[in-house]
Image (cartoon, rainbow, N blue to C red):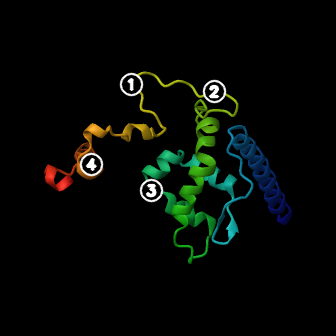
């Protein structure tokens, strides 16, 4: 019986290493490679075990919706002193596994731009994900005394008189 447990452990380790290789390749192909395995509670996080458990429970969305990260933490036997383990697992899942889950578990298209491929154009009316600093350039004719903009004050929801602005 000890042999079967040892064989099972070796099989699990082999599956975990194969998973890790595939995960690294996935991240490398997306331009987000990683070298180090995250550490929680002083030990390397078993990303394969985390992925398997979360997908068994329905995936990242369901686990987060039902706030099951605390239950998952219990299965990893982290030290009691690791009080933020649930938060850490969730963050590491987001960083390393969430996109992988979408593509490999749910079969969604990989919406990430691949290195060397041009960024697709946004459809009309779409909200861009980049920040346009030029949208905050204010023409001199809109600036009050001291170079302050009354437009900016109104945009942040603070109503004040013109004399307060100057």
User: Which residue is tagged 3?
Assistant: 67
Earlier-in-chain disc, 1 versus 3: 3
Earlier-in-chain disc, 4 versus 2: 2
Disc 4 crowd, CA 10 A, few/some/many (<14, 14-19, 20+): few
Quadrant where the N terminus is found in the figure: bottom right
88 horizontally vs 141: left or right: right
Q: Residue sitting at 79 percent across and 56 percent down?
A: 13
Q: Residue extending furthest right?
A: 3
Earlier-in-chain disc, 2 versus 1: 2
Q: Residue sitting at 37 percent across and 40 percent down?
A: 137
Earlier-in-chain disc, 1 versus 4: 1
Q: Residue sitting at 79 percent across and 59 percent down?
A: 9
Instruction: Indicate which disc residue 118 carries.
Output: 2
Q: Is residue 33 visible?
A: yes
User: Which residue is tagged 4?
Assistant: 156
In this rendering, the label closer to the viewer, 4 or 2: 4
Earlier-in-chain disc, 3 versus 4: 3
Q: Which percent across, then down, holds residue 74?
A: 56, 66
Q: Is residue 160 visible?
A: no
Mark 3–mark 4 contact, CB under 8 Å?
A: no
Q: Kindly report the distance in space between the C-alpha atoms of the residues bearing marks 4 and 2.
A: 35 Å
């Amino acid at each position: 019986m000890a042999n079967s447990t040892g064989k099972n452990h070796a099989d699990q380790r082999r599956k975990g290493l194969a998973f890790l290789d595939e995960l690294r390749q996935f991240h490398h192909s997306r331009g987000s490679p990683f070298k180090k395995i995250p550490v929680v509670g002083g030990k390397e996080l078993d990303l394969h075990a985390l992925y398997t458990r979360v997908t068994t429970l329905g995936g990242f969305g369901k686990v987060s919706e039902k706030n099951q990260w605390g239950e998952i933490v219990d299965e990893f036997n982290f030290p009691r002193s690791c009080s933020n383990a649930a938060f850490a697992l969730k963050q590491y899942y987001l960083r390393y596994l969430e996109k992988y889950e979408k593509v490999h578990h749910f079969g969604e298209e990989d919406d990430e731009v691949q290195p060397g491929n041009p960024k697709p154009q946004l459809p009309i009316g779409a909200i861009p994900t980049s920040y346009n600093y030029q949208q905050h350039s204010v023409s001199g004719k809109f600036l009050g005394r001291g170079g302050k903009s009354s437009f900016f004050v109104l945009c942040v929801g603070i109503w004040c008189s013109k004399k307060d602005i100057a």
